[in-house]
Image (cartoon, helix red, strand yellow):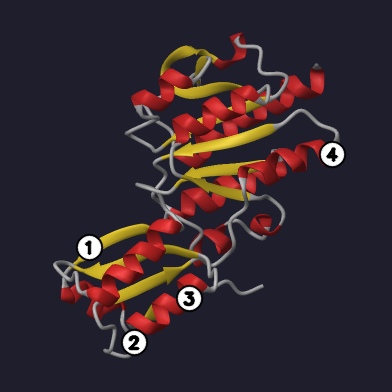
Amino acid sequence: MAYQESYIEGRNAVLEALRSGRTIDKLFILDGCHDGPVMTIKREAAKRDIILKYVDKDRLDQMSSTGHHQGVVAQTAAYDYADVSDILDNARNKGEDPFVFILDNIVDPHNLGAIIRTANLCGAHGVIIPKNRAVGLTATVARTSAGAINYTPVAKVTNIGKTIEELKKEGLWFVCADMSGTVMYKHNLTGPIGMVVGAEGEGVSRLVKEKCDYIASIPMKGDIDSLNASVAAGVLAYEIVRQRLNG
């Protein structure tokens, strides 16, 4: 299956796309442009909690294929997002304890695609990503997932910390991958669980980490001190799978 995100150019076209419910990842607006039509577009975007990026004319020109963007370009997603409730329903329908991946600040589309693929293969019920400072469901993500994006729901949320708190009310508890934690083999990773993984180098943000119940480290014996984000997600996820199978 071919996946393709696209750009919608021009004020009327973007406004119609917003009002029709089209899945839009980001909205790029010419910096300093605040006239009536643009303000209407911004209000419609705000209703849908769509990210706004203010950029210069050169950036808009690069994205434009027509040269008539009128200071507004919308980037559509290559695939529709799910709701967090869809992920929980996925677990209920299978009669299983929820197993959810939560990703913090993953900006590389190849990493995200690989993580979605791993989530599917290890039986996770869905993946949650943030709206800001993270890659969305681009065509590269879809291709790298090797088809897993068709089966594993991906939800995009405004606040990861708040989402964790809401999922705790649903009975989930959370383990965060971080080098400062206790070796993952020493944690009980069974039951309804959310696994939180951050970007390589940056890791999970402090505020998100504080929401987690356990901090788990992956034992490493080499000369460097970090794993690629998708590899780290796979290693910790399959320790969860091992414990769930043995539990």
Quadrant for the N terminus in the image: bottom right
Quadrant of the frame with the C terminus: top right
Residue tagged 3: 17
Spatial CA distance of label 1 from label 2 is 19 Å
Mark sitting earlier along the chain (2/4): 2
Q: Nearer the viewer, residue 4 or 70?
A: 70
Residue 184 placement: quadrant: top right
Q: Earlier in the sequence, mark 3 or mark 2?
A: 3
Question: Please, what is the three-letter code of the amino acid marked with disc 1?
Answer: Tyr
Give left or right: position of 12 versus 93: left
The residues bearing labels 2 and 4 have C-alpha atoms spaced at a distance of 45 Å
Q: Amino acid at mark 2?
A: Ser
User: What percent of the width, then of the height, locates residue 140?
Assistant: 49, 63
Query: How far apart are labels 3 and 4 at the CA level?
Result: 35 Å
Q: Which mark is residue 94?
A: 4
Residue beneath disc 1: 54
Residue 107, above or below 233: below
Q: Earlier in the sequence, mark 1 or mark 4?
A: 1
Tag 3–tag 2 contact (CB < 8 Å):
no
Q: How far is the residue under mark 1 from the one under mark 3?
A: 19 Å
Marked residue nearer the N-terminal end (3 or 4): 3
Residue 54 coordinates in the image, percent (x, y): 22, 63
**Residue 212 rendering spot, x and y as whole percentages:** 50, 20
Q: Which mark is residue 65?
A: 2
Q: Is residue 127 above or below residue 182?
A: below
Residue in the picture at 48% in, 25% down: 177
Residue depth check, mark 1 versus mark 2: number of the one nearer the observer:
1
